[in-house]
Amino acid sequence: MIIVDRFEGDSVVLEDTDIERFEVVDKKLFPDDIREGDVVEERGGSYIVNSEATQKRRQQIVERLRRMGL
């Protein structure tokens, strides 16, 4: 799974959770509404947001925080 970790200037820092690696990519390769935490997929030299995976991941995080009492 590839997740938008953060933005640094005109770059996006991606975290590939499958191989525990970070990569810095030009922000121009992403849609304008990209956000930290979005799950993305590479398609044809650019990136798209996987909305379903992003929503599922956010729900899992909320549930973990709830179980921790936060």
Image (tube, rainbow, N blue to C red):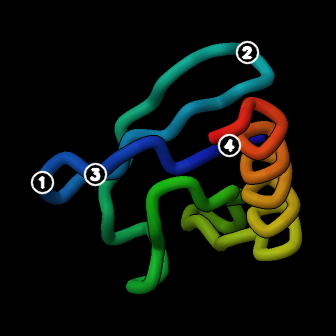
Is residue 56 positioned above or below 60 on the image? below
Q: Secondary structure at mark 2?
A: loop
Rounded to the nearest angstrom, the CA distance separating label 4 from label 1 is: 20 Å
Q: Check contact, mark 1 vs mark 3: CB within 8 A.
A: yes
20 and 61: which one is in front?
61
Residue 6 in the image: x percent, y percent? 36, 46
Rounded to the nearest angstrom, the CA distance separating label 1 from label 2 is: 25 Å
Q: Amino acid at mark 3?
A: Phe
The residue most toward the bottom is: 32
Which of the two labelled residues, at mark 1 and mark 2, occupies the earlier sequence position?
Answer: 1
Question: Circle 1 is placed at which residue position?
Answer: 9
Question: Circle 2 is placed at which residue position?
Answer: 19
Rounded to the nearest angstrom, the CA distance separating label 4 from label 2 is: 10 Å
Q: Amino acid at mark 2?
A: Ile
Residue 7 in the image: x percent, y percent? 28, 51
For the N terminus, give its image quadrant.
Answer: top right
Residue 49 in the image: x percent, y percent? 67, 71
Question: Circle 4 is placed at which residue position?
Answer: 2
**Badge 4: how crowded within 10 Å, few (<14), some, or many (20+)?**
many
Which of the two labelled residues, at mark 4 and mark 2, occupies the earlier sequence position?
Answer: 4
* Left or right position of 35 against 64: left
Question: Circle 3 is placed at which residue position?
Answer: 7
30 and 67: which one is in front?
67
The residue most toward the top is: 20
Rounded to the nearest angstrom, the CA distance separating label 1 from label 3 is: 6 Å
Quarter of the view holding residue 52: bottom right
Q: Check contact, mark 4 vs mark 1: CB within 8 A.
A: no
